[in-house]
Image (cartoon, rainbow, N blue to C red):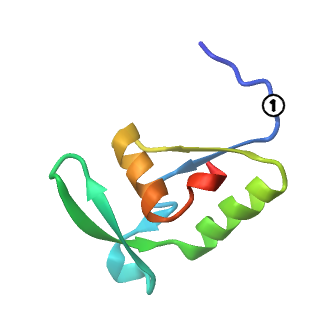
Amino acid sequence: MKTIKSEAVRPYDVDGCLIVNHKDSDLKAHVYDPITQKYIVVGVNKSMVRLLREEHHRGGFIIVWSRSGYEWAANVVRALDLVPYV
């Protein structure tokens, strides 16, 4: 077990949090899917992306994860231009 001894940790899930069905959002992104090896269109949850950036600026330690795997999470972070915050 690993314990992060900090109250500043802010975890974000990818699917359903940072990205949503592209039909449910007016802002879209193209994310490379490592399983299909194709780019897919996803909807961007603008309010959660803004919150992530704000929490980073307030000193939060941002962790982005996905049950779909680390490659998918990393590709979403890149597609949403969140690398400097994560």
Most distant residue in the bottom direction: 26
Relative height, residue 2 to residue 62 (above, below): above
Q: As displayed, is residue 79 above or below residue 11?
A: below
What residue appears at the point 58 percent right and 50 percent down from the top-left corner? 12
Residue 8 image-quadrant placement: top right
Please state which of residues 64 and 15 is positioned toward the viewer in this rendering: 64
Residue 56 appears left or right of 32 = right
Rendering quarter of residue 16 = bottom left
Give the residue at the far front of this rendering: 84
Residue 28: name its quadrant. Answer: bottom left
Left or right for 22, reference 45: left
Name the quadrant of the N terminus: top right
Q: Residues within 10 Å of mark 1 (few under 14, many from 20)?
A: few
Q: Position of residue 43 (x, y in %)?
A: 40, 74
Q: What residue is at 65 percent from the left and 53 percent from the top?
A: 85
Outermost residue on the top side: it is 1
> Residue at left 51%, top 60%?
17
Q: Write down the residue under mark 1.
A: 6
Looking at the image, which is closer to me, 64 or 16? 64
Total of numbered circles in the picture?
1
Q: Position of residue 50 (x, y in %)?
A: 66, 69
Task: Identify which amino acid the numbered label 1 is placed on.
Answer: Ser
Dot 1 falls on a residue whose secondary structure is loop
Residue at screen point 39% across, 52% down: 75
Vertical order, 43 against 73 (above or below): below
The percent coordinates of residue 35 (x first, y second) are 19, 46
Q: Is residue 25 toward the left or the right of residue 63 in the image?
A: left
Tell me where residue 46 appears, x and y as whole percent: 57, 75
